[in-house]
Amino acid sequence: MTKTLILIPSRMAATRLPGKPLLKINNLSIISHVFKRAEEANIGEVVVATDNQEILNDVVKNGGRVILTNKNHKTGTDRIYEAYEKLNIKNVDYILNLQGDEPNINKDDIIKLNDFMINQDAQLGTLAAKIEDDKTFNNKNVVKVITDKKLEESNFPVALNFTRDNLSINYQNIYHHIGIYSYKVSVLEKFISLDQTKNEKMNKLEQLRALDNKMKINVALANSSPIGVDTEEDYLAIKKIMEYKI
């Protein structure tokens, strides 16, 4: 049976909204909301990987599993790889990297990506959603992915590029990228051994390291676009949605 491990990188030192993992929604921290969504997906063990004792204490207090990692990682992927090595969990086939700042991510989307990866024996996969609002194309905080084919419920096309810019005039098949990745363990090992590329650093998108090194990233269609908490405005928006949900 195929075994998946979900790892959630989380740190306090976010530039635009420091301390965001511990901001509360319905009296529960953002990071603990993400942990619970991952657990609800029921596809494998879930562990938060953090460099911060406060985050560790919060996750443990709320019934989660957490591991302390080095403070000096350049990317979240480096952090989850350290966590994977330290955990020493045997016979893991896939590692799913779930962002710690998307507390309303749909558990069915997590399940869907995992199913696609296993059924198609894919190397590296992610999610994207349809863009419903034209303003999204011009929003630099929203990462867009361009795929080689139209994204549909039943297919798993290849990503051609990821960008923060508006390329909607020049390209079709542009979607709102969702920050979740599933790696075969061997692919994750290869990825973290590669140097950061100029393209990756310039755009602040680590998935470009994979594309720059000819690694194929497949994309599955998500049901919805979760709000990533990057700014105070994002936090207030998602807090309102989650606290006043009927």
Image (cartoon, rainbow, N blue to C red):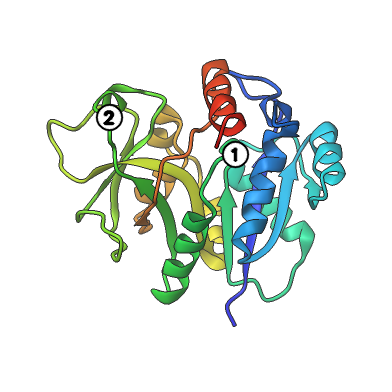
Question: What kind of element bears circle 1?
Answer: loop
Residue at 54% across / 67% down in the picture?
186
Q: Position of residue 168 (x, y in %)?
A: 18, 32
Q: Earlier in the sequence, mark 1 or mark 2?
A: 1
Q: Quadrant of the C terminus?
A: top right
Q: Amino acid at mark 2?
A: Asp
Residue, disc 1 = 103
Instruction: Specify the label residue 166 is tagged with.
Output: none
Residue at 51% across / 62% down in the picture?
111
Q: Position of residue 180 (x, y in %)?
A: 50, 49
Q: Which of 184/61 is in front?
A: 61
Quarter of the image holding residue 134?
top left
Residue, disc 2 = 133
Q: Amino acid at mark 1?
A: Pro
Whether 177 is drawn above or below 181: the answer is above
Q: Taking 204 as reference, is 28 left or right? A: right
Quarter of the image holding residue 166?
top left
Mark 2, other Cα within 10 Å: few <14 / some 14–19 / many ≥20: few
Residue at 76% across / 40% down in the picture?
70
Whether 167 is drawn above or below 8: the answer is above
Residue at 71% across / 23% down in the picture?
19
Q: Quadrant of the N terminus?
A: bottom right
Q: Which of 224/121 is in front?
A: 224
Whether 46 is drawn above or below 89: the answer is above
